[in-house]
Image (cartoon, rainbow, N blue to C red):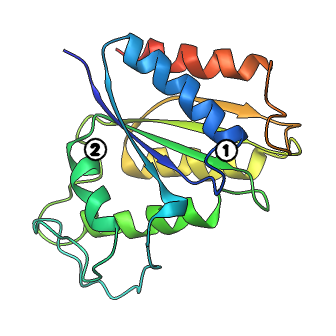
Amino acid sequence: MGKHIVVLNGSPRRKGNTSTLVQAFREGAESAGHQVTEFFLGELEIRGCKGCFGGHSGKEAPCVQRDDMGKIYPAVKDCDVLVLASPLYYWTVSGQLKTAMDRLFALEEADGNLLRGNGRACALLMAAEGNGFDDVVLYYDHLMEHLQWENLGKVLCGGVMDVGDIAGRSEIKDAYALGKSIS
């Protein structure tokens, strides 16, 4: 039986280089029999975390704010694999992805930690104009340690700024192979 994979795509460009990596990953994962649900965060209304500690993981809507995170929470609760996809902005993930990640904290609050552990796994897909991925990889590795998730791998594609720059790059095949390798 296939895994349920959720992709949080933090690219502001639906047809950009990061989205090309996501598409290749998706094709690989679906060819291996997995179900992939992608959230294109740039088209969703997601407000920043208020730091109110008012969330409650056991509730259907774990956060006190009512916005499009309400679509993401149930999918993340039920997923086996979470894929973080983003362009590299100032040596970290995009604001769209960071905001969604911050809001996932509501799944860790109150009487049942629905985010940490639970046998989940994660992968990171990123595209960037440059190659300065060290800081974001450090963040990602710390996140995996905190959440106690298996790190399935990273596909980091530097040297791609304009839409389409990624065409013909080996990282597209790497993203496909990463998706296909999930077991």
Label 1 Cα crowd, 10 Å radius (few <14 / some 14-19 / many 20+)? some
Residue at position x 72%, y 39% in the image: 17
For the N terminus, the quadrant is top left
Q: Amino acid at mark 1?
A: Val
Query: Quick check: 53 left or right of 22?
Result: left
Q: Is residue 179 above or below residue 156?
A: above
Query: Quick check: 49 left or right of 132?
Result: left
| Labels 2 & 1 near each other (Cβ < 8 A) | no
Q: CA separation, marks 2 and 1?
A: 20 Å
- At mark 1, the secondary structure is helix
Rendered location of residue 30, percent (x, y): 38, 18
Of the two numbered discs 2 and 1 on the same chain, state the one appearing first in sequence. 2
Front-most of 68 and 79? Answer: 68
Total marks shown come to: 2
Rendered location of residue 56, percent (x, y): 17, 73
Rendered location of residue 98, percent (x, y): 55, 64
- At mark 2, the secondary structure is loop
- Residue under numbered circle 1: 137
Which label was assigned to residue 56? none
Which label was assigned to residue 117? 2
Query: Quick check: 98 left or right of 63?
Result: right
Rendered location of residue 176, percent (x, y): 56, 17
Residue at position x 66%, y 52% in the image: 13
Label 2 Cα crowd, 10 Å radius (few <14 / some 14-19 / many 20+)? some
Q: Is residue 139 above or below residue 20?
A: below
Hey, which quadrant is residue 120 in on the image? Answer: top left
Query: Quick check: 132 left or right of 29?
Result: right
Hey, which quadrant is residue 122 in on the image? Answer: top left
Residue at position x 57%, y 47% in the image: 140
Front-most of 53 and 172? Answer: 172
Q: Amino acid at mark 2?
A: Gly
Q: Is residue 129 above or below residue 180?
A: below
